[in-house]
Image: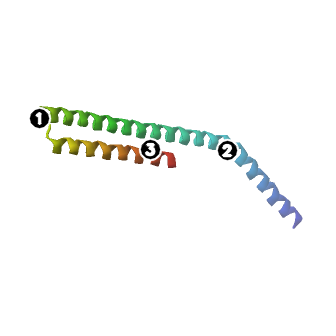
Amino acid sequence: MRRNRWKRHAGRDERCTGRDERRPGRDAQEEVRDAQEEVRDAQEEMRDTQEEMRDVQEEMRRAGRDERCAGSDAQLMTLGRDAESMEEMRRKRCEMRRKR
């Protein structure tokens, strides 16, 4: 009976050392996951920047149209509201990033 116990313990020890040997592979996988996460974050940041650029270009186009159309007060007020709402969206995005 003792002999069987010894064998079981020896088997456990072998399994434990096997796990330790595999550890560097796990570290490499974690590094890969971290790198992939960084890439995703960078891509998301690029998308946000591109979206902001599109918003700015759209604002510029609207401003150009308003100037050509003699810029009635109603149009100028709508432009101001649009700019405020976009600023709020940017603030919300920044807050969401900070929470992560």
- Which of 66 and 73 lies nearest the eye of the viewer? 73
Q: CA distance from mark 3 to mark 2?
A: 40 Å
Disc on the earlier residue, 3 or 2: 2
Residue at the image point whose x is 53% and y is 37% from the top = 35
Which residue corresponds to the image point at 24% horizontal and 37% vertical from the top-left? 58
Left or right side of 8 for 97? left
Q: Secondary structure at mark 1?
A: loop
Q: Residue furthest bottom?
A: 1
On screen, residue 2 versus residue 99, left or right, reads: right
The disc, 2 or 1, on the residue closer to the chain's N-terminal end is 2
Q: Position of residue 80 (x, y in %)?
A: 26, 42
Mark 3: amino acid: Cys
Question: Which of the two residues, 31 or 58, is positioned nearer the viewer here?
Answer: 58
Quarter of the rendering containing residue 34: top right
Give the number of the disc on residue 92.
Answer: none
Q: Residues within 10 Å of mark 3 (few under 14, many from 20)?
A: few
For the residues labelled 3 and 1, the Cα–Cα distance comes to: 36 Å
Residue 11, given in percent of the width and then of the height, sits at: 77, 55
Q: Secondary structure at mark 3?
A: helix
Answer few, some or many: residues within 10 Å of disc 1's Cα (few below 14, many 20 plus, some between 14 and 19): few
**Residue 94 numbered tag:** 3
The answer to whether residue 47 is left or right of residue 55 is right
- Callouts 3 and 2 close, C-beta under 8 Å: no
User: Residue at position x 36%, y 46% from top?
Assistant: 89
Position above or below: 42 against 78 = above
Could you tell me which secondary element the residue under label 2 belongs to? Answer: helix
Name, please, the residue furthest toward the right.
2
Q: Kindly identify which numbered label has been placed on residue 70.
A: 1
Q: Position of residue 85 (x, y in %)?
A: 31, 47
Circle 2 residue? 22
